[in-house]
Image (tube, grey):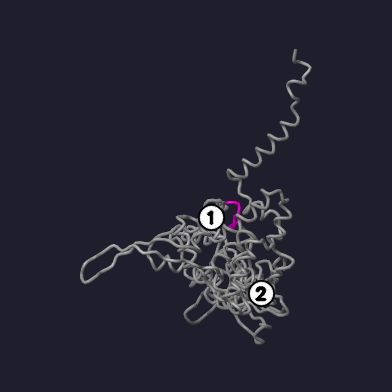
Amino acid sequence: MEIKAKVFKRKTGKSKDKWITRIEYYDSVLGKAKTMERQADRRANAIDERDRLINELKKSHGQIQTGERMSFAMLADICGERFFKRAVIVEGLKIEGVRSYDTAQNYLTVLKQFFGKRRLGQITVESLKDYRRWRLKIGSRRKEIVASKKFVPVKLATINRELAAMRRMMRFAYGEGWITKDVFFQAKMIDTSAEIARTRRLTEAEETGLLAACQGERQTTYTRNHYGKIRNVTANISIDNPHLKAVILLAIDAGMRRGEILKLRWEDIDFQANLIRIVGTHTKTEKARLAPLTERVKTELYRVREFTPGEMPFPFAEFKRSWTTAKRIAGIDDLHFHDLRRTAITRWILQGQPIALAGKIAGHTNVETTMKHYTSADADIVHAFTDKMNAVHAQSIPDASESEFVN
C-alpha cells in the first residue's frame, strides 16, 4: 500500500509550535483516502511517531485507524454476527455458527461487562489477568444464581471457556488489521491443567434409588390449612415417569449426552440389532457414532413408545424439574446429569473394555479426554486394579506344598 508521511512544525492554531506527523494512505476496505495526524513537542518524537504509524499501517493493511476507534463491545457485536450465531446445518454438517448458541451469548455478555468500553488497543496481558481476578471475585453468572443473589464460586473451566471465546475474537481482530499484536500469544492465559476434573459417579445403590424414584408409590407429608387449622397430611402418591427413567438409563448404559438423548428419533433406534445410531448433527464433535442398546433400555423405550407415538421418544426440551425431584426422593446430593455418562464410560472400562474402545463408543476424538474426565481413579477402580494384581501374584507364587524348601 502507498503511504505518504510528513513531519512539520505548525505555525498557527491550537497546536502552534507543535511538531506534527501527518500520514496519508488509501483504505482499500472503505475505498477512500484517509489522513492521520499526531503531535509532539520535539521533532525527534514526531519522527518516532511517524515510523510507528507507518509500521502499524503496513501490519494492519491500513485498518489500524478503524481498530483505534473500536471498543470491545463493538467487536463483540461484529463477532456475534460473523461466527457466534446459531448453527447453520446443511446436509447434516455445520457450515457456520455455533451449536451452543446460548452458551456463547453468555460468554459475550460477561466479557462485555468487563471489557465493553475499552478500546481494542488498550487490552493488554495485564487486562486479561485483571479479568480472571474479577471473574473469581464476582462468582457464577448463571441466571438462577444471579436471581437468587447468592455467591457461588465460578469454576476455572468456565473462565477458560470465556477467555477462549475472547481469544477467537481478538485473533479475528488481529486478522482484520484492527490490532497489531495478539495479546493471547504473549502469555498463556488459558491453563486447562489447572482445572479440577469432576470425578463424581453414580453408585449402584444410588442408581437403584434413582430409578425407583421414577416409578412406584411413595408417601409424602404436606401442610394443609383446613378451616383455619394447620394440619400435617400424609398421602400415598403413585409415580410413573417412563420418559425420565428411559432418559436416565440411556445415559447410564449408552453413555449418551443430554442433547443427544433429547434429539433422538425412533428411526435412530434399531431394536433388532440392539444399537442406537447417533447422527453427526446431534453430537458435540459433529461425528456420527453407534451406541449400545441394552435390554433394560429397550424395555423402557417400549413403554415410552406407548405414550409417545410421534417422531421423537422425548418431545420436550428440558427435564430439569423431574430430574431434581427424582434426586430429592432418592436422597442423592451433588449429582449432575452428565455424571451418568461418566458412570457409563467408567463401567465399560471396569468391565474390561480398552480405554480407546470406550472412548470411541463415547464419541471422544482424543483418548486423553476419556482418561482425564471419564476414568476417575476412585475406590472402585483402585479395588479392581488391586484385585487384578493379586490374581497375577497368586499365579506366580508356587504352592507351599510343592516348594523344594519345604521339608
Q: Position of residue 224 (x, y in %)?
A: 28, 67
Is 119 or 136 nearer to us in this picture? 136
Describe the element under mark 2 as helix, strand or loop: helix
Q: Position of residue 213 (x, y in %)?
A: 48, 61
Is 243 or 163 nearer to us in this picture? 243
In the displayed structure, 16 sits above or below 404; it is below
Q: Is residue 380 magenta-colored?
A: no
Q: Earlier in the sequence, mark 2 or mark 1?
A: 1
- The reply, left or right, for residue 106 in relation to residue 33 is left
Residue density around tag 2, few if under 14, some if 14–19, many if 20 or more, within 10 Å: some
Is 42 or 39 nearer to us in this picture? 39
Residue density around tag 1, few if under 14, some if 14–19, many if 20 or more, within 10 Å: few
Residue 363, quarter of the rendered image: bottom right
Q: Is residue 189 magenta-colored?
A: yes
In the displayed structure, 1 sits above or below 301; it is below
Q: Position of residue 383 (x, y in %)?
A: 62, 40
What residue does disc 1 label?
Answer: 208
Q: What residue appears at the point 57 percent right and 60 percent down from the top-left corner?
A: 338
Q: Please name the predominant secondary structure of the magenta segment in the image.
A: loop
Q: Which mark is residue 266?
A: 2
Residue 281, quarter of the rendered image: bottom right
Residue, far bottom: 32
Is 356 or 268 nearer to us in this picture? 268
Query: Distance of mark 2 from mark 1, alpha carbons?
Result: 27 Å
Describe the element under mark 1 as helix, strand or loop: helix
Q: Which residues are magenta?
A: 188-196
Q: What residue appears at the point 52 percent right and 62 percent down from the top-left corner?
A: 127
- The reply, left or right, for residue 279 in relation to residue 127 is right
Q: Is residue 7 visible?
A: no
Amino acid at pointer 1: Thr
Q: Is residue 285 visible?
A: yes
